[in-house]
Amino acid sequence: MRRKMIAGLAGLTLLAGLVGLGAMQVIGTAGVGIAADAQKSVTGNLEDSFCYTVVGAHGAGHAQCALKCAQKGIPVGLVEKGTEKMYILLPPKNEQAMPDDVLKNMEKEVTVTGKSYSKGGIEFLTVESVK
């Protein structure tokens, strides 16, 4: 009887340890998706995300519309040259407007440098410089 109790306690201890390790792994990897990568530079075209995604409008003939959309708060996307991967651009800090260097270059090819983030399958890039 005593042997069965010791074996049962050992099994419970092992189970508790495995549950604890699983919880540590979940907690440890939960923050990975929101951690910023090091500085990253991405070259591509600045697009208003609505017209580019929903209507397919882009290019020099769409520049004024793209500027108006960006000024009204439509998220600006940077479509990476060669991969067509879109980064949603974010201002460098919370409660700041999108930098003017972004707005004046809508529908043009630029290189944006900033911190990249990935959350919920969406790629984000803060705008620290535009060239």
Image (cartoon, rainbow, N blue to C red):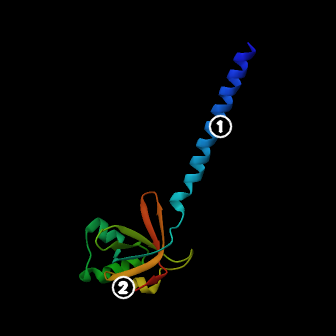
- Name which residue type carries label 2: Asn
In this rendering, position of residue 93 left or right of residue 89: right
Where's the N terminus, which quadrant? top right
Residue drawn at x 51%, y 58% as measured from the top left: 33
In the image, residue 18 sits, relative to residue 51, either above or below, namely above
Q: Decide if residue 71 is in sight here.
A: no
x and y, in percent, of residue 12 in the image? 67, 28
Residue drawn at x 25%, y 69% as measured from the top left: 56
Compare residues 78 and 82 and report the one nearer the observer. 82
What kind of element bears circle 1?
A: helix
Quadrant in the picture for residue 122: bottom left
Classify mark 2: residues with Cα within 10 Å, few (<14), some (14-19) or many (20+).
Answer: some
x and y, in percent, of residue 16 in the image? 66, 34
Q: Decide if residue 129 is in sight here.
A: yes
Read off the residue under disc 1.
Answer: 17
Q: Nearer the viewer, mark 1 or mark 2?
A: 1
Read off the residue under disc 2.
Answer: 105
x and y, in percent, of residue 102 in the image? 41, 82
